[in-house]
């Protein structure tokens, strides 16, 4: 019962963080502070009922997740708000939540060998994020134009949009840098992380277009909020379990 209550308590915070991340691409620290402070009721209760084994699990979960997300954060895998959210989850869920509902035992795939719930959430989130390029490619097929064939790999990470429409769209990045060479021709260079078009001379792009140096459409990449992936990873971890562990075991056992 305590696990179901913790899940019901956690979901509003995660859903709000998704909304905030989608709208302004950041999540206020207050969200995680409120979640940790109000969720401490569960932690205190489980310390009294679980004793030393629970304290050991709490310490192990917090330390391992903190080190993991600290490294990934500095590698640029996700933002500070995502990291803080995962750390709070590691404190609220030091043990993998196993519960029964409607005569079913969850997670449906069983408890993974390494029962660190937050790492499972992160693993599921990263695994599900790998499906985004496939979805982007399908989107481009539905909106196909011959111009896409010049940069076919871009179809997995972005889409083409009119330069004139950029001012009406938020949270997009340019997939290419545009520079003039000594002969006055435009050189295109791939921008690995996606350049914010506001900070990268949008007026120049319009000028290049007017001079006929570039077309009216350019490649852009959407800034996808990772909190959305974390929330989906949380839900799938609760209902199904550890996808990566399950896939590996299926491959080993055939």
Image (cartoon, rainbow, N blue to C red):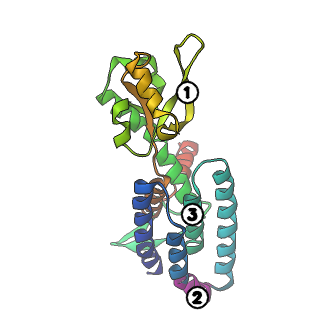
**Picture disc at residue 86:** 3
Q: Where 65 sits versus 166, above or below?
A: below
- Considering depth in this image, is 79 or 162 the residue closer to the camera? 162
What label sits on residue 25 in the rendered view? none
Residue 184 as seen in the image, left or right of residue 99: right
Magenta highlight on residue 44: yes
Q: Which residue is mark 1?
A: 190
Helix or strand or loop: what does disc 2 sit on? helix
Depth check, mark 2 against mark 1: the one in front is 1
Q: Position of residue 234 (x, y in %)?
A: 47, 61
In the structure shown, which secondary structural element does the residue marked by tag 3 occupy? helix
Q: Position of residue 100 (x, y in %)?
A: 41, 73
Q: Nearer the viewer, mark 1 or mark 3?
A: 1
Q: Write down the residue under mark 2.
A: 49
Mark 2 in CB contact with mark 1 (< 8 angstroms): no
Q: Determine crowd level at label 3: few under 14, some 14-19, many 20+ residues with C-alpha closer than 10 A.
A: many
Which contiguous range is marked in magenta?
Answer: 41-50
Q: Quadrant of the N terminus?
A: bottom left
Give the main secondary structure of the magenta stretch: helix
Local packing at callout 2 (Cα closer than 10 Å; few below 14, some 14-19, many 20+) is few
Can you see residue 210?
A: yes
Residue at image coords 40%, 36% = 136
């Amino acid at each position: 019962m305590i696990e179901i209550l913790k899940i019901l308590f956690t979901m509003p915070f995660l859903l709000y963080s998704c909304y905030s991340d989608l709208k302004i691409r950041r999540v206020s620290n207050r969200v995680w502070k409120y979640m940790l402070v109000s969720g401490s009721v569960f932690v205190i209760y489980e310390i009294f009922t679980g004793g030393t084994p629970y304290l050991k699990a709490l310490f192990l979960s917090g330390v391992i997740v903190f080190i993991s997300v600290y490294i990934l954060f500095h590698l640029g895998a996700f933002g500070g708000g995502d990291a803080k959210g995962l750390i709070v989850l590691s404190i609220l869920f030091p043990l993998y939540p196993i519960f029964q509902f409607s005569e079913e035992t969850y997670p449906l795939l069983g408890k993974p060998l390494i029962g660190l719930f937050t790492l499972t959430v992160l693993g599921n989130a990263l695994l599900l994020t790998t499906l985004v390029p496939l979805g982007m490619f399908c989107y481009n097929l539905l909106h196909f134009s011959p111009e896409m064939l010049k940069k076919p790999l871009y179809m997995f990470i972005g889409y083409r949009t009119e330069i004139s429409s950029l001012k009406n769209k938020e949270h997009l990045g340019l997939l290419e840098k545009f520079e003039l060479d000594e002969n006055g021709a435009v050189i295109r260079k791939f921008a690995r992380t996606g350049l914010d078009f506001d900070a990268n001379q949008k007026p120049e792009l319009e000028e290049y277009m007017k001079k006929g140096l570039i077309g009216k459409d350019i490649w852009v990449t959407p800034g996808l909020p990772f909190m959305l992936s974390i929330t989906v990873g949380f839900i799938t971890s609760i209902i199904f379990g550890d996808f990566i562990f399950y896939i590996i075991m299926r491959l080993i056992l055939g």
